Structure formats: structure tokens, C-alpha cells
């Protein structure tokens, strides 16, 4: 019996929240419909098996639940122990009483069970050991009983009973029972709950709490309603060792036992009860328990006023979850329960018990027992699916995949797909396929057929996997065929995007050709066909289509597959289609498409010929030497500004041919350059002065060639032209003596800016004098500085120590005996010689001269004689 509830609670699931009956009016139906949109907090299952057989013959009067078992009392006085499937526990069936069992109590460990009845007996049984079994006869109806929670290990074996008195019974001396009256005089006691140190009970006047640790009563909670206690019993529930729920008639109180902090208050209990929440409901209370920070109430609808002779039919009981406030409450959920025979029952016929640790709630009626428990993720997801909130369900299925037992992401996804197809939301269905497919190839093949039947493969195409997994070729061909027939642009896009290995290229080519037989000029399909031919390595077919369409991809096709031989006769066509790309391709592939071939094909298109040769010249001028003459004509025709730079930078053309071309077109600047290169300087200067009439140009020309005769010719030409004279005066000062020009100026000639020109000449002359003087001073100063450094260097001493030897005789230079001393010569290369050892007085070191001086050269190393 110690097996976990979650493991053994495998009850047949029943639907406890039903639609309203046909007898209810339309407004009730609308209310039920709106309530269906609110997810219930709990789910419900009916306890069956042996329990069904028991209740078929008898009626349940009370129940106690424990983590190990269910204890059921009946109106015939029987006491049954059941497992959570409703099966009897063997040898645990007690014929304990002769009349209705009023209350059952189980100790904290589930080792002992006590029951009481109107037959005046209290029956206590040990489930595992009989030593403490006993039957106590009180000779009066006992309405309530409660075992000490620690009865299983307490030596006193205490329990309390309630009739018209609250009696505490415990073992005394010699093992005899000792009874103590804790309270009396306020009517029958119908409910007792014992938790920790506190006993709570209810009589006709209210609820009392007794502190067993202090042996005193600590509070009295007034009844505060006029309902008969025998018809509307008080429901007590300890949420924990300090929090007590009181549900009586239509009133709810939440009470907390607190310690009295007033230490010096005499005759006051050390603990007191504070009511933290108190409110009135619009229903009667048949049971009350806790659920986390909320309250679960088994409620009974209040009766309507009946006319005389009208028979009352009770409504279904409700299990409500509420959040208590100070003087009101918030209803979280409200579930109507279909209890068997509910039409005949009253408020006192229902009971509510719970296993707090498992959040399980047992609803007991005379002929039915239903267990409610918190809905798990499977329940939540099933409810979301039922209400077509599939997106939320899928998210939860991913998040809680390890917790799910009945639901799976794939199954939810398939239900969602079915719903989307019913609503014709094919785009959303296609996106969903990606989420739920994983790498299931069969799933994609099946769903593709499903989309194909609806002619909606266009929605699925963007999401079809292209690798890992790769689907059957038929699936891809099926999609392409639908696009081919209904959406040619989409077909072309798929041909470009999809790897051609996914399908049979030849099959698709045949299908496209079949359509082109009736629509030969369909450019979109022609473009797609060119792509397909490329995939099939039939590049000539693809190229012919691209050229026909003048499609930009023709260049990519040519370069990718080196189709340069195939286009050698289509160069003009390519240039007309895209001049820039065509020329760039030709320039980049000169080895594959010879320049002669291109120039020949472009002969009738000189503009293209010029562009091609110009760009090729910019890239590789050396290779363009054979075409220099042609380039001169093309530059003269299409781009004169490039002609003169070309003439200056190139020497491969014929000067006379170039001169004739320029003379024909009257390109004077180019003629001047060519005449200058040919040596006809005077003719060139004459052309500048007579045709161009630019004195600056003439001056620059003379400066460039620096010829005295040219200067004389220019001066002679300019002598009667004041504007030319001004230009010469301003510019020739650095190349020609201005006096030559000034002397030849006619007296009385008006020359604009003459004064300024003369002033400038004088300033230029003074500037030249200053510059020359400055240069002279710098040279003189540098000479002195260098001479001073040389003298300083030569004056420096050179160290000669005892280890130095003469490089000729190999004897030591320094000796102690002066009679053997001699004069020495020391070179700045640090070679030392005796004067006697030198063949002659020399200003250069014999050793260094031999090693470093080349024949015919002279190296003078400074010397110092000592």
C-alpha cells in the first residue's frame, strides 16, 4: 500500500464536465458554451472496480484518504480499505458498526484507522499489528472521531470523540483508557480535525480550537448563520500546522494560529487565532481543502423558492477553485460534476477529502466517488488542441517533451495540418511541415501528394528539403510540373534554386519542349530551358538560346564552360547586347579569342573596335604595337582627347601617317607634337604662332627644345605683336637674356603691362643674384666646417701600447732601454712601423695600400710620426 499514487492511479477517464441538459434554457446553454473556452484547472476520473460493486449494494457515508490507501465507510456500518483503483485490499474489510459510519480518521503514518457510528462505538484497528486494536463503547451516538496524528508511535494512544461532549481518550495506568472531557454544553459535535498540536471541532454554536501542548482552548469562532447544522454540516481543514479553513453553509473563514507576543498579559493564552479572510458565497459548502495558495470547495447550489407541491430536483455539485481575499474571493475555476444520482442529494450527502502532497481531491457521494487532480501537460495540450490552439500546443510539446506521456509533437502537428487543410490555409500548412517533419523522408513524400491533390504545391515548394533528407525525384518533378503548367516564372525560379541532381533533367527538358512546341516565343520558358541544357552539359544549345534572348547570363555561361570557340563569330552580337561585359570578356581571354579575330569582326563597327583596342591598350600597351596606326585613326574619330597622350607615349606608329591624319582633321596641337618629334621645329613653332596663337604654348615649346634659333624665330615673330612681347617678357627671363628682346622693341610701341613686366624681370634678376650669393656663402661655410673637422680629426692622439709591433720587422715598438728606441710612424689605420723599417717616407700605409688599392688608384691614409 506504500506504492506512489501517481504510479498506481490508472483509473478509467470520464468526462466530468458535460453540456447542460436539454431541459435547461437557451441562456444556460450560452453560458456553458462560453465556459468551454476556459480551461478547467482539474481533471476528473471515476473510481471504479470493487468500489462500484460496494456502492451498488450500499451507500458511502464518509471517507478518509491517505497516501497509502482509501478508507470508505458505509451506511450499513462497513469499513473498507481500497487501493486507488478502487480494488479491495485483502483482509481489510471490517464489519465495524451496526449503523452508519459517521467519520473515519487515519494517523499520520497510515498505520491505524479509527471510525465512529451512531451505534455508540469507536473502532480502532492497526493495519499492520493488532496490539492496539480496540473497540470503545460510549453508549451514545458518536458523531466524530480523530486520532492523534502521532498515534502510531505515541505511548498515550490518544484520540478524541464528539457526541454532545468533546472527549479525549488516552491510555492510563495499567493500560486502561482514561477519558477527559475537553468541552461540552453547546450541542452535538459533528466534525473534528486534529493537526499537530491543535484540535479543531464544530458544534451548534461555532468552531473551537484546543492547544494540546498548552492543555487549553485558545479560540471560539462564532457560527454567524442561521442554517441547521444537521443539514449543512461544518467543514474543517488544516492546510498546515497553523492554518485552518472553515467552510460552513455559505460562509468561509481562513484562520491562522499565532503566538501571543504580549508576555506580561496574565490569564491570556499563549496562542490565539486570527481570521485573515472571511467572506460569504452564493452557494453552500459541502467540503473545503487547499490547493497551493488557493482554496478548493465542493459546492452545492442554493435552492430556489419552490411553489407548494413542487418537487425539488437538486443541481449538479460544483468543484470550485477560488483565491481568497480579505473579505471577498476571486473564482479561478468552476467545474460542474456529473455525480450519479445528484438530483436526489442534499448538501450533507457530499464530502471532499484530499491528499495535499499530491494535489488529489476526492468527491464522495452516496453512490459515486470521483477523484480530481491537477491537469498535467498532456491534459493542457489536449485541451489546446481541442480548442484549435495548435501553435500553443506545439510550443508546449517542445518545451515539455520529456514530461509528455500521451501527446507528441508530431501527432499534434498532424492534427494541426488537418485543420489547416480543412480551412484551406495551405501556406501555413506548408510552413508547419518544416516544423514537424524532422528528417522524415516519407512524411514529405506523403504530404507532397496531399498538396498536389489540392493543386497547392506552389505553397509547399519553398519549404521542400533539398538535402538531409533528399526526397524521391518524382516528388520534385511533380512540383516542377505544376509550376511549369501554372506558373512559368515560379518554374524558372525553382530551376535556378534547386540543385539539378534532385530530379531528372532530361524529363523536365522534354516537358518544357512539349509546351514550347505551341508557344515558341515564351521567353521565360526559353530561359529555363537554357538553364536545363546547361545542367545537361549541352552548352551549345544553351548558348544559342541565351544569344537569341540576349540574356545577361550568356557571359556567365561562356566563362563558366569556356565556350569561346562557339562565340568567335558572334562578337558583334555580344557587343550589341552588353558592350561592357563583352569587351571585358574579350580582354580577359585574349589567348582564347585572338585580337586579330576580334578586330576583324569589329571592322564594320569602328566604335566597338575603338573601345576594345583602347581598353586593351590600357591593360597591355606592349601587345598593341601592331595596331598603333589603327588606334590613331580611331582616337581621331571617337576620342580626340586621348590622341595626344597616345602619340606622346607610343613610338610604334608611322610619323608621316599620323601627321597626315592630323593635318586632314586640322588637329594643330597633335601636328605640333609630331613635327617636333620629326625635327621640324621651325615649322612646328610657326604652326603654334599662326594657327594656335598661344604665346605660352610657343614659349613652352622653345623651352622644351632649348634651341637658340627657335628663340630668335619666336622673338622675331613676336616683335610686332604687343601681347606676345608681354608674354615673352614675363616668361623668358630664366632661359634667354631679356635684353635681346628689349633692344628689338620699336620705340613708341604700346605694350600692355610693360612696366610690370620690367619690374618682374628686375626682381627675377635680383632674386637670381641673391640666390647665387646665398649658395656661395653656403659653400664657403661648408668648406670651412669640413676643413675644421679634418684638422680636429688629424690632431687626435692614437694609442700605442706595449703589445704593438712593427708591421715590417715584427719587433716591439715600445722598449724599456732607450738605446734601442727609434722613431716610429703611426697611420690612422692603427698600423705602426719603425721609421727605419719603412722603405721610404710614405704618406700611405704600405699594408692597406697593398690590400685595398686597386691598380692605378691612390688611397692616402693620414699618418702621425712619433
Image: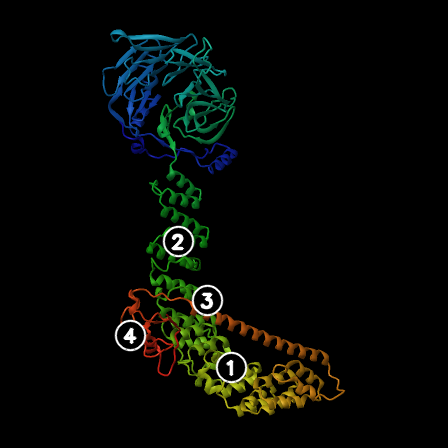
Residue 857, quarter of the rendered image: bottom left
For label 1, the SS is helix
Q: Is residue 139 visible?
A: no
| Mark nearer the viewer, 2 or 4 | 4
Instruction: Read off the residue under disc 1.
Output: 608
Tell me if 247 is positioned left or right of 87 in this view.
right
- The mark nearer the N terminus, 4 or 3, is 3
Question: Which quadrant of the figure contains the N terminus?
Answer: top left
| Mark nearer the viewer, 2 or 1 | 1
Q: Are marks 3 and 2 in contact (CB under 8 Å)?
A: no
- The mark nearer the N terminus, 4 or 1, is 1
Quote the CA–CA distance across marks 3 and 2.
25 Å
Quote the CA–CA distance across marks 4 and 3.
106 Å
User: Is 738 or 695 nearer to us in this picture?
Assistant: 738
Q: Residue at x 50, y 87 (%)?
A: 630
Tell me if 648 is positioned left or right of 816 in this view.
right
For label 4, the SS is loop
Q: Is residue 759 visible?
A: yes
Instruction: Read off the residue under disc 3.
Output: 488
Residue 468 placed where, x, y %? 34, 57
How has the structure been colored for display?
Answer: rainbow
- The mark nearer the N terminus, 2 or 4, is 2
The residue carrying pointer 3 sits among few (fewer than 14), some (14 to 19) or many (20 or more) residues within 10 Å by Cα, namely some
Q: Is residue 215 above or below residue 380?
A: above
Instruction: Read off the residue under disc 2.
Output: 434
- The mark nearer the N terminus, 2 or 1, is 2
- The mark nearer the N terminus, 3 or 2, is 2
The residue carrying pointer 4 sits among few (fewer than 14), some (14 to 19) or many (20 or more) residues within 10 Å by Cα, namely some
- The mark nearer the N terminus, 3 or 1, is 3
Q: Is residue 174 above or below residue 845?
A: above
Q: Which mark is residue 808?
A: 4
Amino acid at each position: 500500500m506504500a506504492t506512489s499514487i501517481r504510479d498506481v492511479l490508472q483509473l478509467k477517464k470520464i468526462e466530468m464536465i458535460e453540456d447542460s441538459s436539454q431541459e435547461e434554457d437557451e441562456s444556460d446553454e450560452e453560458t456553458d458554451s462560453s465556459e468551454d473556452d476556459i480551461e478547467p484547472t482539474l481533471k476528473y476520473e471515476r473510481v471504479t472496480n470493487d468500489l462500484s460493486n460496494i456502492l451498488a449494494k450500499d451507500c458511502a457515508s464518509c471517507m478518509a484518504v491517505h497516501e497509502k490507501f482509501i478508507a470508505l465507510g458505509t451506511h450499513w456500518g462497513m469499513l473498507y480499505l481500497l487501493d486507488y483503483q478502487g480494488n479491495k485490499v485483502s483482509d481489510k474489510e471490517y464489519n465495524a458498526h451496526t449503523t452508519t459510519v459517521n467519520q473515519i480518521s487515519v494517523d499520520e503514518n497510515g498505520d491505524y484507522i479509527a471510525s465512529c457510528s451512531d451505534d455508540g462505538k469507536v473502532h480502532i484497528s492497526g493495519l499492520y499489528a493488532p496490539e492496539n486494536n480496540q473497540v470503545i463503547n460510549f453508549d451514545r451516538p458518536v458523531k466524530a472521531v480523530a486520532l492523534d496524528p502521532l498515534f502510531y508511535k505515541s505511548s498515550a494512544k490518544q484520540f478524541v470523540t464528539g457526541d454532545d461532549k468533546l472527549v479525549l481518550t488516552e491510555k492510563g495506568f495499567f493500560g486502561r483508557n482514561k477519558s477527559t472531557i475537553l468541552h461540552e454544553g453547546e450541542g452535538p459535535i459533528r466534525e473534528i480535525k486534529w493537526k499537530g498540536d491543535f484540535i479543531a471541532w464544530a458544534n451548534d454554536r461555532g468552531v473551537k480550537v484546543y492547544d494540546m501542548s498548552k492543555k487549553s482552548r485558545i479560540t471560539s469562532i462564532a457560527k454567524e448563520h442561521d442554517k441547521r447544522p444537521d443539514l449543512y454540516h461544518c467543514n474543517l481543514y488544516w492546510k498546515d500546522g497553523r492554518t485552518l479553513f472553515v467552510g460552513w453553509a455559505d460562509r468561509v473563514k481562513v484562520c491562522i494560529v499565532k503566538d501571543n507576543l504580549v508576555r506580561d498579559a496574565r490569564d491570556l493564552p499563549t496562542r490565539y487565532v486570527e481570521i485573515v479572510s472571511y467572506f460569504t458565497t452564493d452557494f453552500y459548502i459541502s467540503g473545503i481543502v487547499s490547493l497551493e495558495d488557493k482554496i478548493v470547495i465542493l459546492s452545492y447550489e442554493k435552492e430556489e423558492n419552490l411553489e407548494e407541491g413542487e418537487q425539488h430536483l437538486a443541481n449538479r455539485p460544483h468543484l470550485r477553485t477560488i483565491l481568497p481575499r480579505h473579505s471577498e474571493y476571486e473564482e479561478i475555476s468552476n467545474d460542474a460534476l456529473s455525480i450519479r444520482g445528484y438530483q436526489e442529494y442534499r448538501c450533507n450527502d457530499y464530502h471532499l477529502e484530499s491528499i495535499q502532497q499530491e494535489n488529489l481531491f476526492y468527491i464522495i457521494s452516496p453512490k459515486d466517488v470521483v477523484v480530481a487532480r491537477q491537469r498535467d501537460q498532456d491534459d493542457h495540450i489536449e485541451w489546446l488542441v481541442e480548442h484549435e490552439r495548435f501553435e500553443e500546443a506545439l510550443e508546449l510539446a517542445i518545451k515539455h517533451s520529456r514530461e509528455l506521456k500521451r501527446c507528441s509533437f508530431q501527432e499534434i502537428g498532424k492534427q494541426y495540418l488537418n485543420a489547416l487543410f480543412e480551412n484551406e490555409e495551405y501556406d501555413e500548412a506548408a510552413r508547419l511541415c518544416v516544423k514537424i517533419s524532422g528528417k522524415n523522408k516519407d512524411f514529405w513524400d506523403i504530404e507532397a501528394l496531399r498538396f498536389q491533390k489540392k493543386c497547392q504545391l506552389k505553397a509547399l515548394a519553398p519549404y521542400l528539403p533539398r538535402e538531409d533528407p533528399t526526397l524521391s525525384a518524382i516528388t520534385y518533378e511533380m512540383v516542377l510540373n505544376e509550376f511549369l503548367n501554372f506558373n512559368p516564372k515560379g518554374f524558372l525560379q525553382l530551376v535556378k534554386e534547386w540543385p539539378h541532381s534532385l530530379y531528372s533533367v532530361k524529363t523536365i527538358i522534354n516537358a518544357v519542349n512539349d509546351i514550347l512546341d505551341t508557344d515558341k516565343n515564351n521567353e521565360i520558358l526559353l530561359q529555363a530551358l537554357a538553364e536545363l541544357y546547361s545542367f545537361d552539359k549541352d552548352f551549345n544549345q544553351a548558348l544559342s538560346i541565351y544569344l537569341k534572348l540576349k540574356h545577361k547570363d550568356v557571359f556567365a555561361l561562356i566563362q563558366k564552360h569556356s565556350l569561346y570557340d562557339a562565340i568567335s563569330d558572334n562578337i558583334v552580337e555580344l557587343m550589341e547586347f552588353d558592350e561592357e561585359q563583352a569587351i571585358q570578356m574579350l580582354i580577359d581571354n585574349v589567348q582564347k579569342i585572338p585580337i586579330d579575330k576580334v578586330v576583324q569582326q569589329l571592322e564594320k563597327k569602328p566604335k566597338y573596335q575603338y573601345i576594345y583596342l583602347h581598353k586593351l591598350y590600357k591593360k597591355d600597351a606592349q601587345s598593341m604595337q601592331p595596331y598603333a596606326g589603327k588606334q590613331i585613326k580611331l582616337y581621331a574619330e571617337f576620342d580626340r582627347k586621348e590622341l595626344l597622350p597616345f602619340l606622346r607615349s607610343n613610338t610604334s606608329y608611322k610619323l608621316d601617317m599620323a601627321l597626315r591624319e592630323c593635318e586632314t582633321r586640322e588637329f594643330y596641337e597633335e601636328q605640333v607634337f609630331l613635327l617636333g618629334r620629326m625635327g621640324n621645329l621651325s615649322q612646328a613653332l610657326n604652326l603654334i604662332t599662326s594657327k594656335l596663337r598661344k604665346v605660352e604654348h610657343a614659349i613652352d615649346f622653345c623651352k622644351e627644345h632649348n634651341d637658340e634659333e627657335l628663340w630668335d624665330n619666336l622673338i622675331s615673330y613676336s616683335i610686332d605683336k604687343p601681347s606676345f612681347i608681354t608674354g615673352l617678357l614675363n616668361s623668358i627671363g630664366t632661359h634667354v637674356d631679356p635684353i635681346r628682346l628689349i633692344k628689338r622693341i620699336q620705340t613708341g610701341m604700346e605694350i600692355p603691362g610693360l612696366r610690370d613686366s620690367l619690374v618682374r624681370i628686375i626682381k627675377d634678376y635680383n632674386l637670381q643674384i641673391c640666390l647665387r650669393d646665398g649658395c656661395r656663402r653656403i659653400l664657403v661655410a661648408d668648406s670651412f666646417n669640413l676643413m675644421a673637422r679634418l684638422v680636429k680629426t688629424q690632431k687626435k692622439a692614437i694609442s700605442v701600447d706595449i703589445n704593438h709591433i712593427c708591421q715590417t720587422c715584427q719587433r716591439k715598438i715600445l722598449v724599456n732601454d732607450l738605446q734601442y728606441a727609434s722613431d716610429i710612424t703611426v697611420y690612422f689605420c692603427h698600423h705602426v712601423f719603425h721609421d727605419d723599417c719603412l722603405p721610404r717616407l710614405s704618406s700611405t700605409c704600405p699594408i692597406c695600400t697593398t690590400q685595398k688599392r686597386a691598380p692605378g688608384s691612390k688611397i692616402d691614409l693620414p699618418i702621425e710620426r712619433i
